[in-house]
Image: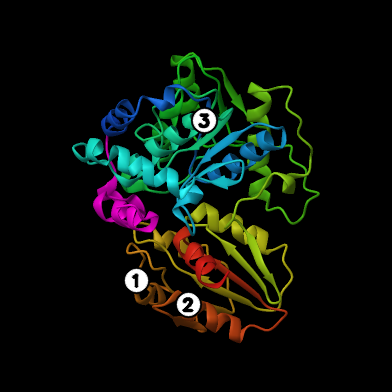
Amino acid sequence: MTNYKEIVAFLYKQYPSFQKKGISAYKDNLNNIEKLCEIIGTPHKSIKTIHVAGTNGKGSVCNMIYNIYKKNGYKVGLFTSPHLIDFRERIIINDVWISKDYIINFYEKNFKLFEEIQPSFFEWTTALAFSYFKDSATDINIIETGLGGRLDSTNIINPEISIITNIGFDHQNILGNTLEEIAKEKAGIIKENTPTLLGPNIEAKSIFEDVSKVKNSTLYIAENNYNKNERSIPEYQLKNWETAKKAVQIINSNIKINDKISDYLTIEGRWQIIEKIPKTILDIGHNKDCIIEGEKQLLKEKYKKLHLIIGFSEDKNVDEILDVIPKADYLYATKSDNERSFNPVILKNKLNLNNKQIFDDYKNAFKSAKNLANKEDLILVTGSAFLIGDILKEFY
């Protein structure tokens, strides 16, 4: 098998993927990833890393730290998930995606060796990222956890610093039903004699204080003194910026950082304005806290009527999210192509709104909103990274 698309399709089909299968793809230990990395020469032990976990904001913090180092002349790797359009988005060095040839060669070289282990899709991808960064001789690598922390496949690294952006309710079926339980899972990335940084105003702080003390980890907390002058930057990204900036300053005090946040924020799908007339915004907010932050940002926008396109994954607490969704003039309930998408029929029935429509196809939902919206209106697409990815892939 020498075709890139065939290999990615095979991996999705052959190995359980949380992106497609949900909890059935989750492993409750690190045995597989340790075995995989042992087979390929333990590349994670040869690279410098920064490890980032958190319920929300970890992808943005990773992106900001990555850009800080890149702008200072470093060769920097970035490993994040999920991807929005192309699998290769997950593994980047200095704005260049991992090559198709490298993926093909890695697959052909290791397929037989990996076959007995039967890794999950994320375990396979994590091993690929570590191998690529080692072979590319990067200076520093920003590694985002996939889910949780303690049992996440990325948690075999020994980073320069461990970062936990915040704690909120998401993936309760795996991480626990209380903030304290979730915090204990995230705190699993705290390492012996390695600094730890918490985001501003983090919940369950005592959990992290206790674990840091046991691990002899110096604990830092990002401050909440962000500059609100950049009105186009959502407030939650200002908090993420304080976390990213503080992390770099802790481990590299000589790094130059200016105060223009937009210079360091290049991530897609986070309050991303893709059209100006009518203003069309994509935001991957997929839990209650994300939706609340999005509504705060909506208050800064000027528009006549709001067209809200929503779709969720079936493992989300949809009732909890619907309690806080923005009040829309027109609502379009739909779903992405992902097999874990929440049934839009059920979604529509849960909503007590007059101007609501249901679409089995996100393409028709988006086209309908575009046709109905006037130039002074605002279209907001939210609820799922998979929905945002499908919209970007199809229309942009």
Q: Position of residue 57 (x, y in %)?
A: 56, 45
Say which residue label 3 marks: 205
Q: Position of residue 41 (x, y in %)?
A: 35, 25
Q: Earlier in the sequence, mark 1 or mark 3?
A: 3
Q: Which of these two is toward me, 11 or 32?
A: 11
Specify how the rendered protein is coloured.
rainbow
Look at the numbered disc 1 and give the secondary structure of its residue: loop
Q: Is residue 142 above or below residue 253?
A: below
Q: Which of these two is toward me, 325 or 284?
A: 284
**Amino acid residing under circle 3:** Lys
Please state if 114 lies on the left or on the right of 212 as rendered. Answer: left
Q: Which residues are magenta?
A: 1-28
Q: Position of residue 90 (x, y in %)?
A: 48, 47
**Amino acid residing under circle 1:** Asn
Look at the numbered disc 2 and give the secondary structure of its residue: helix
Q: Residue at x 49, y 57 (%)?
A: 84
Say which residue label 2 marks: 363
